[in-house]
Amino acid sequence: MFDIDFQRVIDQFIYQPDSPMIFISGIFLFLFLGFSLIYSLLGKADTLRILFVTLFSYFFYYKSSGLFFVLLALVTITDYFIAKALSGVGKGALGKTLVLLSLVLDLGLLVFFKYTNFLGETICTILSSYGFHVPPAITGSYLQGVAWQPRDIFLPVGISFFTFQSLSYTIDVYRGNIKPLSRLLDYAFYVSFFPQLVAGPIVRARDFIPQIRRPLHISNEMFGSGVFFIMAGLFKKAVISDYISVNFVERVFDQPDLYSGVENLLAVYGYTLQIYCDFSGYSDMAIGIALLLGFQFPKNFDSPYKSASITEFWRRWHISLSSWLKDYLYISMGGNRHGKFRQYFNLLMTMLLGGLWHGASLNFILWGGLHGLFLCIDKIWHSICPAASPLTYLPGKKSVSDNINHNRKFPLLLLTALSTLITFHLVAACWVLFRAQSFGIANQVFTQILTQFQPQVFMQWVESYWAVATLMLLGYVLHLLPDSWTDKSRSLIIKMPLLLKALILIILIFIVIQIKSSDVQPFIYFQF
């Protein structure tokens, strides 16, 4: 009666390198329904519920990276016991040694899996430029003279995220900001919690740990907000980001010289929107799923392309990473406590390392360096000409324009609009380095824009790529809408009956199925 291929069913529970499990894959949606049912039945049994979620999280990571879930367990166990030891030794020499051990273990794993080939190639290039020759008998099979032979090293998904998250725990325990957990299970739950495990946001221990043993309570507002964030993230990722990527952006960045300057510029605008919708879409879904499970994550994106300066952009973009870099790298190097020159140096080094965090490539280092340079210029300009600086955005504050003298409001609003336009194009230009596979490709993109612009091609592009153009326009319009509109939309979803929420979600999934490409597109930040 039922012709079931049991082998195919079993295969769905085995790691498949070509098809990792992500939030928008069918297997995840199916498993999450069963997971949610069991999770709700374990509501009052805290320890069983935490154990169940931890096991599911490890299975989720196994479906994303195979047996590399062992690395996740290794980081969890070592940092848990290091933090326990730190609680009894204070900030003396032993305490510093233990923190250093945590840094070496966590960053050592990150460096090996992510940067071995990059560092080997870079070192060999430098040695070769100075005429050095290293005999193969000494270096083994990976070096031929001074030519690096790349090693086949698999990059575990999300390793940059869970190592940074675990590091923040040991550092905060050392600083005395939090007390170490008394249960290894609770810490394993924190590090492996599947909604944010593979692509963030990077959730701080001090924000998440108090929620672990809190009685499970999912209010109507939390449930409605969760549904809203999941729908918003699904639309951003599977409708806007994937469609404009597969049907336009990838084609141009693969061979920029085959397209006119205006098409290259539109591809830059397209990728600028794509990476935002892709990454913020994942963050939205992570926040939404966590809310459905009774946990609250901080906001990770706050309309970054509304920014009137690079400083403001980094207050709005990937907030969990930028705040992590600020608290654990920038401030640790001295921050702004040792004069202006040291502050600018610290800013530049923080962004260079932030660029390197994104990937083992000179493109990413240059991308980070340019953002660091723009941040320094922004600080200098603001200190020299504070009256000519655009209106400053501060998270959680009302619009500062409300407190501006009426006679100065219009000129400042005009300046802010101009600054926003300039900031957007600086960010978009830097995204070219982020997206291009090489400096050569990036150079081709800029060359086509500057020398082969051909504006008459624009209307032809709109006619040929009308669906892409429509989604790009829709994406930017939705991004630039006032925050109050988003709040009202979320309130509307919260007030809807459960059946209506489910119906809207089903309709959105149907739309995704109709327009998505044949293969599920992995999230961009999975590679980091």
Image: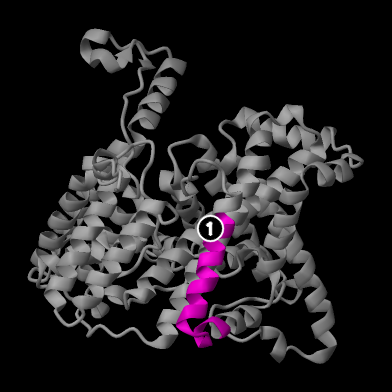
Q: Is residue 122 left or right of residue 466?
A: left
Q: Nearer the viewer, residue 321 or 468?
A: 468
Q: How many marks?
A: 1
- Residue ID at (75%, 71%): 416
- Residue ID at (37%, 63%): 202
Percent x, y of residue 111: 31, 40
Is residue 504 shown in magenta? yes
Using the rendered image of the protein, determine whether residue 196 is visible from the camera's viewpoint.
yes
Relative vertical location of residue 380 with respect to residue 63 in this rendering, above or below: below
Q: Is residue 6 left or right of residue 223?
A: left
Q: Is residue 503 left or right of residue 192?
A: right
How crowded pointer 1 is (Cα within 10 Å; few <14, some 14-19, many 20+) is rated as many
Q: Which residue is mark 1?
A: 344
Percent x, y of residue 514: 59, 52
Q: Which residues are magenta?
A: 492-512
| Rendering quarter of residue 414 | bottom right
For badge 1, the amino acid type reads Tyr
